[in-house]
Image (tube, grey):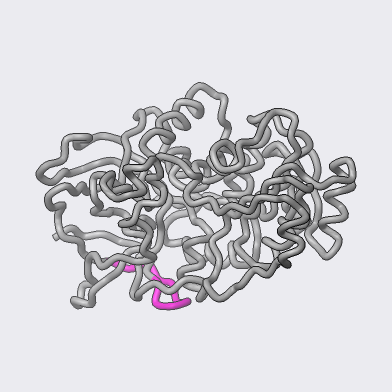
Amino acid sequence: MIAARGLIARGAELTVEEFHLDPPGDGEIEVEIGAAGVCHSDLSMVNGTLAPSFPLVLGHEAAGTVVAVGADVDRMRAGDRVVLNWAPPCRACWHCTHGEPWLCETAGAPSTPRGALPDGTPLHVTLGLGALATRVVIPARAAVPVPGELSFADAALLGCAVLTGFGAIRNTAGVRSGESVAVIGLGGVGLSVVGAARAAGARPIVAVDVSPEKEKLALAAGATDFLVSDGTLSRALRGLTGGRGADVVVECVGRAATIRAAYRGARRGGRVVVVGMGARSDIVELSALELFHSGRTLRGCVYGTADFDVEIPRLAAAVLDGSLDLRPLVTHHATLDDAPAAFARMSRGEGARTVITP
């Protein structure tokens, strides 16, 4: 048995506890976590937005070092630094064989049975990982090696916030230089979208959040303008985009109200991308006439519409050559024991990413 410590949720109750994992079996690896980000999707596991099984080891955005490999693992070995993938493709289902590995039919369950508490109580892990922990045992296909000189903190952010944010701009929206972009919701993913829009040459880049305190973070990430989200948002966006609305609006909240605001903030013929993961019961209503008359496209964005195994090495190279700066995304660093406070801070809408070092 492998002894580990992790952030365990029992509903809204969060505690750091010891638990046990089985050693890696065929096709699996054991990873010592070097750093993990606190993502809003983790909060969705405990606030009722999603419906995982409890007790649950939280965390899905992480990087670490492979310490052991099971049989039939040839893509990595002990000592490799890896970024974890919370939606590993099977490479065999219809979506995988038709160029859409981010929609793999086998990936994406909120929780997966793995491990146990010392008293024998079975555990679940978030999105197949449970990465807010000291150790994980995962399928080898749920990790990709990156250069050892890439810091654990930067590598961890690539695994969710950065891949999703850059993918939303490059892959889902296909933003071109000179197009206008608005980003609603400025957590780690939203700020990554802002940075990706800057890298794509978008202008203006309008960052939107309910908290005025996010303005400084947004401008540091590359926004040209900042708006506080309220009932006048679509009018304010038109005022910054020649009276038309933005060419692209990316929604990073996952609520019906902000998706409607994103749709109405885009120009006629514009593109709306929904990155935020919301509740099944939160229904978005748009009139049939509005859908017809506006000519806008409305697309969901799962994991940046990206092939993880292809994109992560590219993003890692960009960090190492200095063309991708992840510092604007991180507002707090903490230890695993301080992780519950990071969740409380996120629930209040304070800061951006907290990076946890076990």
Closer to the camera, 160 or 287? 287
Q: Is residue 79 left or right of residue 48?
A: left
Q: Residue at x 20, y 77 (%)?
A: 119
Q: Quadrant of residue 112?
A: bottom left
Q: Is residue 166 above or below residue 41?
A: above
Query: Count of labels shown?
Result: 0
Q: Is residue 200 left or right of residue 25?
A: right
Q: Residue at x 45, y 52 (%)?
A: 356
Q: Which residues are magenta?
A: 9-18
Place of residue 130 in the rendered image (x, y in percent of width and height, measured from the top left): 34, 59
Closer to the camera, 330 or 313? 313
Residue with the most extreme top position: 321
Q: Residue at x 76, y 38 (%)?
A: 180
Place of residue 42 in the rendered image (x, y in percent of width and height, measured from the top left): 47, 62
In reply to whether residue 235 is colored magenta, the answer given is no
Place of residue 351 in the rendered image (x, y in percent of width and height, measured from the top left): 64, 54
Q: Residue at x 74, y 47 (%)?
A: 207
Place of residue 195 in the rendered image (x, y in percent of width and height, measured from the top left): 64, 37
Q: Quadrant of residue 124?
A: bottom left
Decide whether the magenta segment is chiefly helix, strand or loop.
Answer: strand
Q: Quadrant of residue 310?
A: top left
